[in-house]
Image (tube, rainbow, N blue to C red):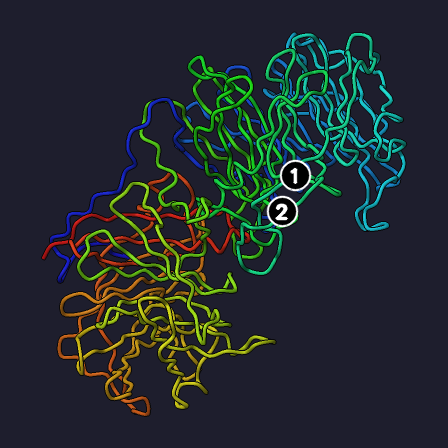
Amino acid sequence: MSSRLSGALAACLLASTALPAAADQFRRIATFHVADNLPADADPKKATSAEIIVATPDGRTLVYTDSPGERLGLVDIADPEKPAAAGVVALGGEPTSVVVAGGKALVGVVTSKSFAEPSGHVAVVDLAGRKVEATCDLGGQPDSLALSPDGKYLAVAVENERDEKVADGALPQLPAGFLSILGVTATGVDCATLRKVEMTGLAAVAGEDPEPEYVDVNGRNEAVVTLQENNHIAIVDLVSGKVVKHFSAGTVDLEGIDVKRDGIIDLSGKMTGVPREPDAVKWLDDTRFVTADEGDWKGGSRGFTIFDRDGKVVHASGTGLEMEAVRLGHYPEKRNKKGIEAEGVTVGTFGGRKLIFVGAERASLVGVYEDKGATPEFLQVLPGGVGPEGLVAIPSRNLFVTASEADGRKGGLVGSLVTIHRYGPEPVTYPTIASAKDTSGKPIPWGALSGLAAHPSEAGKLYAVTDSFYSQGRILTIDATKSPAVITAATIVTRDGQPMPLLDLEGIAVASDGGFWLASEGNPEHEKNKTLSQLIKVSAAGVVEKVIDLPEALAARSTRFGFEGVTVTGKGDDETVWIAVQREWKDDPKGFVRLLAHKPATGTWGQVRYPLEHGAGWVGLSEVTAVKGGLVVIERDNLVGPAAKVKMLTRVSLDGVTPAALDAAEVPVVKKTVLRDLIPDILAGKGHVLDKVEGFAIDAAGNAFFVTDNDGVDGSNGETRFVGLGKITE
């Protein structure tokens, strides 16, 4: 496929948008696809995972657990900007956690027959030889491992987890979990030193069935252990094997949060007495530790907490990280009970600053904070894969790495990823778009951006729409002169004083009278609430003035892949609304889709056909934008990551083109010219190729922009790429 500039855009000066320099922050420098590390004899369709990840002492190799593949994976990061597959080690069971001691990886491996018969062991893996050298039976299902700083002890949280399908997951469900302690040697672990620390009778919640989740060890050889479902925390002296302290993780009251799964991010709700139910835990020093309060059974505080070793809460983050997720379009509206689910946490000292990293599983982001005693200072948010659980700080190389366990390749989504960030004075590149605060002081909620349009006279002022992931159609105003771009306002599309229902807004164009034309895709194949594509005229305030349904000649031919982009040429009686249809309808020749032309003054319709590229998945249109003498179209496939091949801008000349009537036997086929391959622009952020490039606009100053749709963080990593392509001159 060619990639060149021609026609009306032949002399484009296309410069990437860069964020302002920010000293001593993290910048994403590479993304590694875990599927690239599959052994030759592995089924490439089977799910992979990078759940927990650590680094070797020299910081040049990453080691991750791949539970579905029952293996350990290695990634060579000698050059962190070019991570390379470094092989796998078969384990014969599901790995849950890993630490590295010298040249050995110590891995918790689950071999349970059932929840009622939990079993597992610690495997000693020689990293150089890529083989399991020994195993130590634990008598239960290991979850988390931690190595003491002096290298003498290995602490293993043996969870013996509950079956969530039994009694709605209620506790107790025996056998009880416990903590195991093993002595560490130069060749691995000494199985003869195995000690079992009982943890029954500690928690007020199901004390007879403790479920240890995560463990970490401080410089005093004290292990802090979270009992997640029990909402309890214990501190164990590894030398004596005794529980020296234990206390409830407590509860929190949350205000200004979304509490309903209704397709609306409404930040006016509240929850009281929510158990923290912490997952990951890390010592900040010998007297304080930080927990990621994910919740699992009844709780989840949507943030993190710093405790001292006596159980006193030093700092509770409240909803701060969740508001950042909303601001950046990462809020998972379908997970309202537990919100963003802070699951992972780690600590590292970079440039003399002790930093706390908190991974939000459902928001697919990591919050970075500087430990400043009582109140940590928020620094930035880092993107990664879907569900970042494994976090590892490598201060010796100024690197921070995340591992995402989710693999969505079976459903056409992105696979498990390892993401590498570097600390330093380089300009940060994420986010590329964020929202301002509304009148209540909360960030304007957004996500699933689809169509894009430009204000006709104000440079840098753009408009976007949100699609059917949300139950209310909205028009967002964007200030693209800022970096990152800023969503400054949101307007709900209303009809008869109420939000117009069943909208699937995929396109927006500024009408000649200052209002907007909106394209709603519809879905005639949906089991409930069947809808057809519609063209909708609204005022500048979002009030519906006219709804134009598909003519009968088109309605019978339509499919769920309907209206996508919309744009306007001409004014007054000459105003023509052009609409891009995403894929072939029932009577279209294969490989050709419609561009529809509607004249509001006369109510007439016309059509031309657009030739599509061939691709491994389906290929269709996402956007259409008027330029002098023609149209610019986004043409894309529905693939993601390395499989994606078609994400491009093309130009369609309308010179000498007369749209045919809807019942015409012959429909003209337009000629297209490839303007720009957008894949390099997407990859400029060092992430993966995102599926849905959905919006494109050229502002009043001739600057071009495109934006991707993050599907409302449903199966995606929540990332939105808003990219400026620079000034366009003829």
Query: What residue is drawn where x is 70% and y is 32%?
Result: 91
Between residue 9 and residue 430, name the one nearer to us. Answer: 430
Q: Which kind of residue does numbered mark 2 sit on?
A: Lys
Contact, CB < 8 Å: mark 2 with mark 1? Answer: yes
Indicate which disc residue 270 carries: 2
Q: Which kind of residue does numbered mark 1 sit on?
A: Asp
- In the rendered image, residue 637, in percent from the top left (x then y), is placed at 40, 60
Task: Identify whether 73 is placed above or below 17.
Answer: above
Of the image marks 2 and 1, the number of the one nearer the N terminus: 1
How many numbered marks are there? 2
Crowd rating for badge 1 (residues with CA inside 10 Å; few <14, some 14–19, many 20+): few
Task: Identify whether 172 is placed above or below 284.
Answer: below
Tell me the quarter of the picture where residue 217 sits: top right
Query: What residue is drawn where x is 66% and y is 45%?
Result: 271
Q: Name the residue under label 1.
A: 253
Alpha carbon distance from label 2 to label 1: 8 Å
- In the rendered image, residue 248, in percent from the top left (x then y), is placed at 77, 27
- In the rendered image, residue 338, in percent from the top left (x then y), is placed at 64, 45
Q: What element carries label 1?
A: strand
Between residue 68 and residue 633, name the one nearer to us. Answer: 633
Between residue 572 and residue 589, name the one nearer to us. Answer: 572
Query: What residue is drawn where x is 56% and y is 75%?
Result: 526
Indicate which disc residue 644 carries: none
**Left or right of 232 on screen, residue 24:** left
- In the rendered image, residue 665, in percent from the top left (x then y), is placed at 30, 91
